[in-house]
Amino acid sequence: MAAQSEFDAAEFADRLAAMTDEEVFATMQELEDTSEGIRPEDRDDSDVFAQIAMVETAIEDRFPGQLLAPYKDWKQRRIGG
């Protein structure tokens, strides 16, 4: 039985801290895309939602008081541009 790789939250947080804003936004987009393919019954076994929460926090820390607006603006520019 193949176990899923262990998610290291501290290592992921360190990687997020070293990323540019563009990289953080791209990571969020990838995680959102991945999350769409996870069946509801498999969500408890997935680290994707924990990673999404950590990226949301990183975005909110980088842009105080703006919540996810900078990410949403980035997505709009990518769709519209």
Image (tube, rainbow, N blue to C red):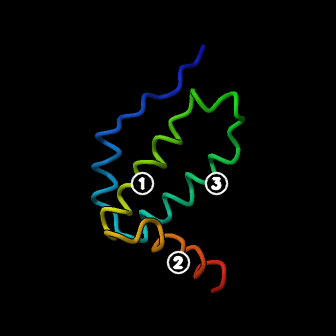
Number of the label disc, if any, that sits on residue 55: 1
Number of the label disc, if any, that sits on residue 33: 3
Residue type at numbered disc 1: Val
Residue 71: horizontal and vertical position, in percent? 49, 70
Q: Nearer the viewer, residue 56 or 32?
A: 56
Q: CA distance from mark 1 to mark 3?
A: 14 Å
Q: Residue at x 29, y 40 (%)?
A: 10
Q: Residue at x 52, y 42 (%)?
A: 49
| Mark 3 or 2: the one toward you | 2
Q: Nearer the viewer, residue 39 or 27?
A: 39
Q: Nearer the viewer, residue 37 or 69?
A: 69
Residue type at numbered disc 2: Asp
Number of the label disc, if any, that sits on residue 23: none
Q: Residue at x 54, y 72 (%)?
A: 72
Q: Residue furthest front?
A: 65
Q: Is residue 56 above or below residue 4?
A: below
